[in-house]
Amino acid sequence: MTPRAICIPVKMPRELCAIDDELKAIYHGPDSVCVWVFESRTDRNRFVEETAGMMKAEREAHFEGFYR
């Protein structure tokens, strides 16, 4: 696939924009966008690695079980 950017105009909450991007993991599906926020870059990277290939519900359950 050729590298490209796809931008979707939305009104993002200021609180979300103020959080360092390295602390956020973003998932998108056909009907939603989810943003998980972590206390450290290490936690964020571990979450991304641990949930690679998971569907939305699995990621949500993983986050609740390990990061809450």
Image (spheres, rainbow, N blue to C red):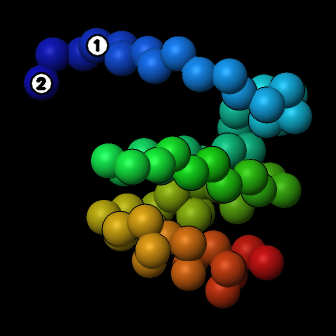
Image quadrant in which you'd find residue 6 = top left
For badge 1, the amino acid type reads Arg
44 relative to 4, above or below: below
Horizontal side, residue 47 vs residue 55: left or right: right
Q: What is the x, y in percent for residue 66? A: 68, 81
Horizontal side, residue 52 vs residue 47: left or right: left
64 relative to 45, above or below: below
For badge 2, the amino acid type reads Met
Pick out the residue farthest to the left. 1
Q: Residue at x 35, y 69 (%)?
A: 54
Residue for badge 1:
4
Task: Say whether residue 42 is visible.
Answer: no
Image quadrant in which you'd find residue 57 = bottom left
Pick out the residue farthest to the bottom. 65
Q: Residue 37 shows which numbered tag?
A: none
Q: What is the x, y in percent for residue 26? A: 54, 45
Residue for badge 2:
1
Q: Secondary structure at mark 1?
A: loop
* Along the viewing direction, whichever of 21 and 46 lies nearer the viewer: 21
Q: Secondary structure at mark 2?
A: loop
Which quadrant is the C terminus positioned in? Answer: bottom right
Find out whether the residues at labels 2 and 1 contact each other: C-beta distance under 8 Å. Answer: yes
Separation of marks 2 and 1 at Cα, in angstroms: 9 Å
Crowdedness near tag 1: few (<14), some (14–19) or many (≥20) residues, C-alpha within 10 Å: few
Crowdedness near tag 2: few (<14), some (14–19) or many (≥20) residues, C-alpha within 10 Å: few
Q: What is the x, y in percent for residue 51? A: 44, 68
* Along the viewing direction, whichever of 11 and 42 lies nearer the viewer: 11
